[in-house]
Image (cartoon, rainbow, N blue to C red):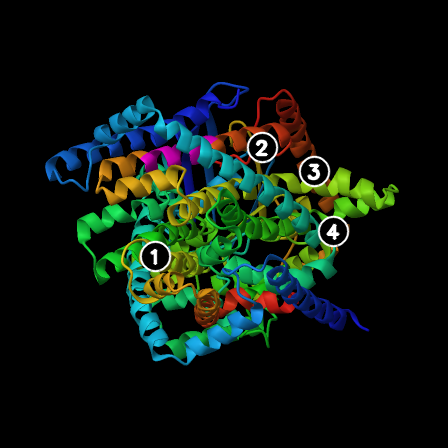
Amino acid sequence: MNRRKQEIVLSFGLLIAFFVAWHLFTIIFDSVLIPTSIGTGRAAVELIFEIQTWRSFWLSNQSLAIGFVLAIAVGVVIGLIIGRVAWMERGLDPWLDFLLVLPMAMIMPVIIMAVGFSLSARVLVVFLFAVPVVIVNTRAGIREVPPELIDMARVFGANEFDLWKQILIKSAAPVMWTGFRIGLSRGISGMVLSELLLVAVGVGMMFQVFQGAFEPDKTFGLVALLIVESLLLLKVLRLVEHRAIPWFHIDKFQNQ
Amino acid sequence: MLINRSELRSKHVPYILSLVVGLALLEIFARILDVPYFPTVSGVFSRLMSLFAEGGIVIDLFRSLQSLFLGFLIASILGITIGILCGRYQLIEHVLRPYINTMVTAPSILFVPIYFAVFGLSRWAIVALIVDYAVFFLIVSTTTAVQSVDRELVEMSKVFGASERQRMRLILLPSSTPLIFSALRIALTRAVKGMINGELLIAVVGLGARSKGFARAFDAEGVFAVATLVVGVALVSGALLSFVDGRVNNWVPNIRRKG
Amino acid sequence: MIRIENASKSFQKAATRKQPAARVDVLDQINIDIKENEFVTIVGPSGCGKTTLLRAIAGLTGLDFGEIKVAGELVTGPSPDRAMVFQTFALMPWASVLRNVAFGLELRGVDKSEREEIARGLIVKVGLKGFENSLPSELSGGMKQRVGLARALAVNPKILLMDEPFGGLDEQTKRLMQEELLRLWELERKTVVFVTHSLDEAILLADRCVLMSARPGRVSEILDIPFGRPRTRDVERDLTYVDIKQKIWEHLRASQIEELTLQSEGNVD
């Protein structure tokens, strides 16, 4: 059997082993709270066929969509400015570090106190979760532009505008896209957290309902759906990235 | 000396200066605004002091640190071991790749209900979450670190007759430790996040729980006080890690930026 | 064509663990006159300021003292009239070869069809026909530098500045590129200032060779290279060539030894 086939078989084997272990676990521990894999699967499918699920997802994802788009727009602008203006770069360094380390989840209730329970609050949370990463990555991207590219552009007659349009942004793009990806991931975390901790709407409310009604199947099923959604969203982002910066990914294909 | 004089002037001083200036500005802004949800910097710090004086927060801190330490330790051991195996043996990496990628991509917070169901309302649920937050990232980073070991070094060792174990011990591990340590620092930040999120959502003790209590009482100052403490914990543990890093990896050349 | 008068530049070197802060004279009263259509090489040990001098001619760095005039005009900033070829190629990784070569023209506002036509012509001239749509990541070092060369020629500059352009290439590719450059130069004899580490390059390509010394950066001597044009590699077998090479090496070697001594005493970065 050749290498590749061997790997696929082993991979699958691992998956099956996982499900077997899960099943054994439920049998041995016989906990009310832990559903079987089959139970989870069934619940997930049931959920897909319920309108309420889609309504909740729609509601939740509104904050994600708006918050994420805002985070990109604002984050990129700030990141670009900070990256280019030297003193700002150094001056804001500690604050960016601070924002990255700060557990946003803790601060969230304070945001509610300020903004109230509403879509805006949830959007703000998603925004705050995502924006630091976008800023930091954008800034890094600008800082890492090879100086010889800048020299080259100036030699060939580029003014500041040309420099930005032709060189800086294009060169920083790969790192920026990494920032978008991580930002999306964090934004999803923010979306879920805001609904579990603050405003029980959408998906968060679903969790509460399932917990209250002791429906572990549905809880796990919902988790599964959310995992699938986040994987899908990130995959879509990846695809867009490949369209936006095809040149960066070309050698990756060649090396495989 | 861990800090040299010229670095002090060009790097550390502006950093601290910026912090001080920023804090001063925040203080002024907060006073002008005079709103309950925007406490002053001084208020937050004095609140933190009084919390320590009262004592309760020390227990919370201790509890949280216990979970953090445990979770981070497990994540490190698991993460680095699996990472090294993946880096060294391509078969293992290819077999595990889809699962690790999935776990790295999916936001860890989604797994909270699962850990809650499995471990119940206990410390272990939080530890599990901390491990989730940190381990997959560590596996990927360690794998990259091992794979990026200079191939020539490995070949050189083969030429000089090194056995598999010797190669692992004398070449692979020392070469990859700098990158692994960098990854550990980032993993620590993630672990702290995991700890906080876990305590906010699950537990009844620890810093997260304490913060939740303040939040319920609309006590913004209390929330920020605990948040500052958490940031402090993250920074101190990060610094400890850096210290160990510096000791273990003192052969790594300092890339100084040319003027 | 190029008049360098009393060019001087120094910078403040930050204090390190091993020594206090110091003022380093990178360029000290450099005076050189370069005629039109002349190919001048600059060779010297590390730290002699040859790259700084080239960048000063390009207008990328300023001088503390003295001035540089090109075609009678003072150099105040970079311009495509003084096009440059970079040691690290400086190609835009996201753009095709065609786009890279046409870059200078694009910045100038030249029409797309026109600039692509000019670019294509040059791509053929440097021997890269068929690679117009390739990305830099798909090219070898030698090919990348050809792109750099084509780009510089595309803007029809008054002078061509080359900063150790073949330094990053292996010996065989280097030799090929040297011959290529000689061939291209014959087609249109631009004024060239070529900085190099290589003794062979310094002589083979040049009409005159500027020898520089370090600490402070000064012109030691300007050698005349007495071989005719068009130039071929055959000159390497000429005894005069061997003599000149020996002379340059003796000059360099003394500086190199000095450099090594300074490094080992911990006085150098």
Residue A20, image x and y in percent? Answer: 66, 66
- Are marks 1 and 4 in one subunit? no
Query: Are the residues tagged 3 and 2 within 8 Å (C-beta)?
Result: no
Residue denoted by label 3:
B174
Query: Are the residues tagged 2 and 1 within 8 Å (C-beta)?
Result: no
Q: Is residue B1 left or right of residue B175?
A: left
* B88 is higher (above) or lower (below) than B60: below
Q: Nearer the viewer, mark 3 or mark 1?
A: 1
- Are marks 4 and 2 in one subunit? no
Query: Three-letter amino acid code at disc 3?
Result: Pro
Residue denoted by label 4:
C236
Query: Three-letter amino acid code at disc 4?
Result: Glu
Question: Which label number is shown at residue A196?
Answer: 1
Foreground pick, C68 / A53:
A53
The residue shown at (49%, 60%) is A33
Question: Which label number is shown at residue B245?
Answer: 2
Q: Nearer the viewer, mark 4 or mark 2?
A: 2
Label 4: how many Cα within 10 Å (few below 14, some 14–19, many 20+) = some
C-alpha distance separating marks 2 and 1 = 38 Å
Query: Are the residues tagged 4 and 2 within 8 Å (C-beta)?
Result: no
Foreground pick, A212 / C206:
A212
Residue B211 visible in the displayed image: yes
Q: Quadrant of residue B49?
A: top left
Q: Nearer the viewer, mark 1 or mark 4?
A: 1
SS at badge 4: helix
Query: Three-letter amino acid code at disc 1?
Result: Leu
For the magenta stretch, what is the residue range?
B226-236
